[in-house]
Amino acid sequence: MGRYSSYMKELWQLQDNRKVIGLTLFGVLFDNSKPFTPGQQLAPFDDTEQAIRLLSQKGYDFLIIAGQPPQKTRNLEIIDFENILGATRDMIAQFGGRVKNAYYAPGTDKNDPYVKPNTGMFERAQNEGMVKWADAYYIGVEASDVKAATKIKATPILIKTNVASKLKAFELTHQIKVKEFNTLFEFAQSLE
């Protein structure tokens, strides 16, 4: 094995040892306070760049698991997801971060194993070696994000939106306490 091959093997091992944060897009990285229409320009939150830079410095890579935006004028199609994920990868790379992979479910049928709170996308990511959920966070904005994270034994993190009442009922019935933050940057600052 040549020096270059040895170097690349060491580099890949270093990258594989980085911690992983799973997250959804809308309400975590991108503002979804107004209904989103496919084709519109997505607006990252003001502190998204700071959050990505800080989490990357703390040794985290990103794994995107996304579904339809909570607020939308119509459902996103596959091409919409592909465009959004491509732009998100570019944005995160520009901010010094690394996206390990991205998974999305364009459907809305709760019987679909890949639509949250079902865990199909999460299980696929783990089966493909992208993450060990028991050692990872999953950051979302809806009760379905928390439910899915709990099912796969990730640490659920909720970015505060209007889901408080649904979440409290979920916490009571499942006897868990979900950590809540106002922004992704606030969460990033809380990590050691």
Image (spheres, rainbow, N blue to C red):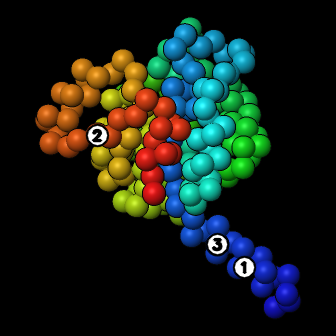
Q: Which mark, by number, is residue 111?
A: none
Residue 120 x, y percent position in the rendering: 43, 45
Residue at 40 percent across and 61 percent down: it is: 135
Residue type highlighted by circle 3 = Leu
Q: Nearer the viewer, residue 134 or 110?
A: 134
In the image: residue 43, left or right of residue 110: right
Residue type highlighted by circle 1 = Lys
Answer yes or no: is residue 177 visible: yes
Q: Indicate which disc, 3 or 1, sits on the residue closer to the N terminus.
A: 1
Q: Secondary structure at mark 2?
A: loop
Q: Which mark, by number, is residue 14?
A: 3
Residue 125 x, y percent position in the rendering: 51, 53
Q: Residues within 10 Å of mark 1 (few under 14, many from 20)?
A: few
Quadrant for residue 133, please give it: bottom left
Answer yes or no: is residue 120 visible: no
Residue at 86 percent across and 89 percent down: it is: 2
Q: Residues within 10 Å of mark 2 (few under 14, many from 20)?
A: some
Quadrant for residue 74, please give it: top right
Task: Mark 3 vs mark 1: give the one in front.
Answer: 3
Q: Is residue 83 above or below residue 128?
A: above
Most extreme residue toward the bottom is 1
Q: Which mark, by number, is residue 9?
A: 1
Residue type highlighted by circle 2 = Val
Residue 188 x, y percent position in the rendering: 50, 45
Q: Which residue is mark 2?
A: 178
User: How far apart, in angstroms, are the residues tagged by discs 2 and 1?
Assistant: 38 Å
Q: Is residue 104 above or below residue 75?
A: below
Residue at 64 percent across and 72 percent down: it is: 14
Residue at 45 percent across and 52 percent down: it is: 191
